[in-house]
Amino acid sequence: MSDRSTRAPGSGAAEELNELRESIADVDRSLLELLHRRMHLAARVGKVKAGQGQPIMVPEVHHRVLTRARQHADACGVSEEVMESIFQAVMRGSIERQHRVGVEFRAEAGSRLLLLGGAGDMGRWFQNFAHLLGHRVDVADPAMAPLPPLAGRYASLADVPDLNAYEAIIVSVPLGRTGVVLEELIALQPRGLVIEIASIKDELAPILDRGREAGLKISSLHPMFGPRKTPYESLTFVLAYAEDPQEERLQVESWIRHPYTHLVPVPFRHHDRLMGWLLGFAHLSGMLFGCALTRSGLGAEELKACASTSYNRQTAAALHVLEEDPDLYYEIQSLNPHRGEVYRAATQALSELVESVQEGDRERFRAVLSDARHFLVTEPS
């Protein structure tokens, strides 16, 4: 009797699967070796670029690599979207490798920076980001008080021996403390650029005006992301300019120059109205989603077990807000002078949708959704 006849049913298929998996593992090892070689080459490119002061991110090269990848999708038996996502990840890795390798080169030309509130979540993010850009960073934060004395680490602004030693001072303190800290800086008159990063700015306007009148160089910057953001994906900063956008852009740009930085100037007086929607309303929708569900009378486990794709997406967006500091989100709502406009529009939109359903007005419902869809898909001019 042959060995084949004595095998258990399905054993041949199982052996074939094991052999195929081993072959795939061999290919994976080859891919990892190729990735290692690619990142080694990226590091060499990074050194050359850093030495010559060339930008790391070159859109034309990025586009060329992705186009080439999409053209090979059919040959690999996958969609263009899959092939593009694979090479997007490889390109992000290459850019990160180039940037990390260039840190010591940038450090030689880097500047000295003081970070006020450096022990907070965004403070720590900025500390890491500034190091990546080659800057030397000192920190002042009340959280440092219990720690042993260490050069470059201070418990308060008053403990900093020489403010004029810094070419820039970043104010990364809670919203309610930003005005107080700016007043202290006005009294101390540092020579370096002061960069405040508050999410709500209107209430700071009189203080910022006094600071400029007193001779301080001040920039109002707003990072449009939280402390969990990786520095190796798109980083949008809004510059709330007071007078000349070009001049103020040049003033702050060198402190955040990075392959993924996107700096958007907006008039200072327009900033908070914009944030009422981009932050206030976006956060509010997530909070409403979670709060309404607590009143549903249904169990979270049951909802999760039966969840639709839309529900899971909404849950992820809501948790991104609900898992963060509630005091921060309260301040973003309460301190924005344009919140009434947002609340009225949200209430009106909900009423219109509810009324159209309750009144059986299908055409009105369609029209409301059509207007919303048209607004969201309209390309910026």
Image (spheres, grey):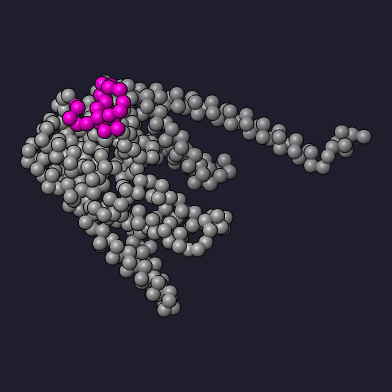
Picture quarter with the N terminus: top right
Let me know if residue 138 is in the magenta part. Answer: yes
Q: Position of residue 155 (x, y in %)?
A: 25, 29
Stretch of the chain drawn in magenta: 135-160
Q: Compared with residue 13, is residue 135 higher up or lower down, i.e. above or below?
A: above
Q: Compared with residue 9, is residue 274 higher up or lower down, i.e. above or below?
A: below
Q: Residue at the spot x=43%, y=50% of the render?
A: 319
Q: Is residue 272 visible?
A: yes
Q: Position of residue 73 (x, y in %)?
A: 53, 43
Q: Is residue 129 visible?
A: no
**Of 184 and 47, which appears nearest the observer?**
184
**Of 149 and 4, which appears nearest the observer?**
149
**Of 84 and 236, which appears nearest the observer?**
236
Q: Residue at the spot x=30%, y=32% of the render?
A: 143
Horizontal side, residue 24 vs residue 232: left or right: right
Q: Position of residue 205 (x, y in %)?
A: 15, 48
Task: Report the residue that reaches farthest toward the right.
Answer: 1
Q: Compared with residue 189, is residue 319 higher up or lower down, i.e. above or below?
A: below
**Of 55 and 150, which appears nearest the observer?**
150
Let me know if residue 157 is in the magenta part. Answer: yes
